[in-house]
Image (cartoon, grey):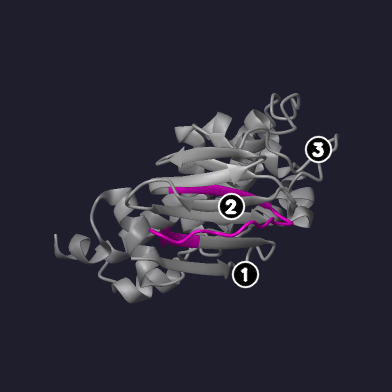
């Protein structure tokens, strides 16, 4: 069955998103003004790019640079299921504005075999499709684009993340603990700590073993478990802990404790 969905997440309006499954559909020749990055979830996509026919199989990444003419078509009898990001150039410029060298929105190769990056992109795409905290979306975007451009783009020589800023990491941790009921953004943490988002995420993870958004989720999950054990309802707990909706609460609680909130209450 062929189906597709295109949308924008209000947190990141400069990123258009596509989730699609095609069997016989074939794109005509076209180009994007944006940097197009995609992941093949199942099947395989054929790609005519820079005069060559390429095959992008399952669990591989597509990278199509701005203004490059290309087509897309089925590379397997079953077609292909995939997710795409279309990053506009102002969004990419803003993402790397604190790096002291120009960042070209160009990726070195059109087909990338990198399971770590694939999973990063998948988690980012899902966070922009489901209910997710702003800190989660911002952090996943920062980490994913950094990995993409450091390994396959134009910031391979940047060394901004080598030094650990201990003070900023502790300030961010204390801020998240004091504001766990809210949903602070990565930009807010930058302001509070005076550190860039790249430095902050790397310093936080180096000291505490997790990223700021993972820390916030753990705090919220622990608080929600405490409320449930005190007999507070799932709905009230979800609202008190700042989750967007019940599915958002259920998903993160189960990820932390292995059971849904309702099952925990019955145990």
Residue 149: give its label. Answer: none
Q: Which residue is mark 1?
A: 10
Segment colored magenta? 19-40
Check residue 37 for magenta coloring: yes
Q: Which residue is mark 2?
A: 71
The answer to whether 2 is drawn above or below residue 70 in the figure is: below
How far across and down, in percent of the image, does residue 26 sit?
50, 59
Local crowd at mark 1 within 10 Å, few (<14), some, or many (≥20)? few
Q: Which residue is mark 3?
A: 99
Residue drawn at x 42%, y 46% as measured from the top left: 75
Q: Quick check: marks 1 and 3 in contact, CB under 8 Å?
A: no
Looking at the rendered image, the quarter that the C terminus falls into is bottom left
Q: Is residue 142 something that shows in the picture? A: yes
Local crowd at mark 3 within 10 Å, few (<14), some, or many (≥20)? some
How far across and down, in percent of the image, does residue 24 sit?
40, 60
Looking at the rendered image, the quarter that the N terminus falls into is bottom left
Q: Quadrant of residue 184?
A: bottom right
96 or 176, which is in the foreground?
96
């Amino acid at each position: 069955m062929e189906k597709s969905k295109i949308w924008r997440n209000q947190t990141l309006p400069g990123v258009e998103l596509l989730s699609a499954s095609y069997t016989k559909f074939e794109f005509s020749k076209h180009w994007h003004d944006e940097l197009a990055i995609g992941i093949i979830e199942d099947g395989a996509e054929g790609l005519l790019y820079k005069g060559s026919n390429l095959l992008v199989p399952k669990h591989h990444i597509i990278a199509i640079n701005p203004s490059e003419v290309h087509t897309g078509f089925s590379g397997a009898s079953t077609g292909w299921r995939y997710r795409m990001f279309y990053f506009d150039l102002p969004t990419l410029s803003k993402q790397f504005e604190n790096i002291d060298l120009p960042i070209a929105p160009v990726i070195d190769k059109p087909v990338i075999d990198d399971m770590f990056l694939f999973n990063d992109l998948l988690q980012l795409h899902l966070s922009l499709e489901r209910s997710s905290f702003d800190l989660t979306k911002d952090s996943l975007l920062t980490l994913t684009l950094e990995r993409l451009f450091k390994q396959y783009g134009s910031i391979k020589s940047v060394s901004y993340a080598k030094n650990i800023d201990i003070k900023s990491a502790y300030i961010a941790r204390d801020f998240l603990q004091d504001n766990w009921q809210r949903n602070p953004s990565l930009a807010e943490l930058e302001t509070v700590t005076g550190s860039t988002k790249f430095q902050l995420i790397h310093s936080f993870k180096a000291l505490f073993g997790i990223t700021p958004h993972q820390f916030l989720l753990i705090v919220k999950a622990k608080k929600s478990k405490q409320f449930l054990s005190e007999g507070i309802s799932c709905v009230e707990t979800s609202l008190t802990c700042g989750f967007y909706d019940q599915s958002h609460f259920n998903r993160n609680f189960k990820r932390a404790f292995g059971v849904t909130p309702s099952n925990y209450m019955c145990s």
